[in-house]
Image (spheres, grey):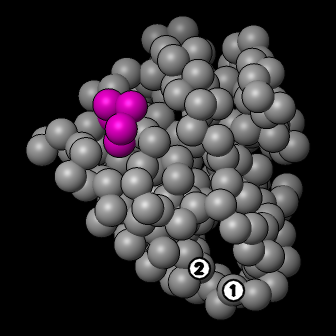
Amino acid sequence: MGTDTTARIPQAELEVISPEHQAEAKPYVMTRARALRRAFEYSGAPLDKSFIDIGSGKGKVVMTAALFGFKRIVGIEFAPELVELARRNLTKVRSHLPADTDVQVVCADATRYDYGPDDCVFFLYNPFGADVMTAFCQQLARSLKAHPRKLWIIYTDPAFIDVMLGQLPVVEKPRLIYGGFEIAFLTHDPATN
């Protein structure tokens, strides 16, 4: 579709809105669409809940989620240059999306973003280190306390899953190995967790 999502970009080359987190940020690396679609299917996450991509980079996951059928998609990225690239990429695929698809990329810090009551499906491709993961999980936990709801987390290359399991009221489901990616799935159901 003429998008630019493949080239790797080291974090050191990017200006960010939260420089205190940059040392823990991982470089932009593209996720393969086929692995994403398989992960979305495997997760069992409902398409009518908001899909949040943490560390959305150039927007590959955001675009794939929209094409997969999620109705509301938000990419959260703290590097303005990547946000602009993602928005340009989205412009190129909008004509392929259903008219009722609400998709956007915002320039924000995932540890400070105000997650709402419909933000239920989260995707992470190992976007940051343990300290920032802890701060992100604490922010998400505050949101769950304010707005109890079911939660689905899809976590590719789950380097800090122990942090998630320690900070959030989630349970881990069986992992998926697909196309060279290891993908963890965590869920939260206030009725059972």
- Most extreme residue toward the front is 2
Q: Residue at position x 57%, y 54% from top?
A: 54
Q: Secondary structure at mark 2?
A: loop
Whole-percent x and y of residue 177? 80, 21
Q: Residue at x 30, y 65 (%)?
A: 91
Q: Residue at x 12, y 44 (%)?
A: 99
The image shows residue 38 at horizontal and vertical percentages of 58, 22
Q: What residue is drawn where x is 51% and y is 18%?
A: 41
Question: Residue 18: x and y, percent?
Answer: 64, 83
Magenta residues span: 66-70
- Determine if residue 165 is in view: no
Q: Quadrant of residue 161?
A: top right
Q: Secondary structure at mark 1?
A: loop
* Screen quadrant of the C terminus: top right
Question: Mark 1 is on which residue type?
Answer: Leu
Relative to 9, 40 lies left or right: left
Q: How far from the left and from the top, in percent, is residue 113?
A: 47, 64
Q: Which of the pair 64/183 is nearer the observer? A: 64
Q: Is residue 129 left or right of residue 65?
A: right
Check residue 79 in the rendering and tell me which mark sits there, or answer none.
2
Depicted 31 relative to depicted 88: above or below? above
Label located before the other in sequence (1 or 2)? 1
Which residue is identified by label 1? 14
Tag 1 near tag 2, CB within 8 Å: yes
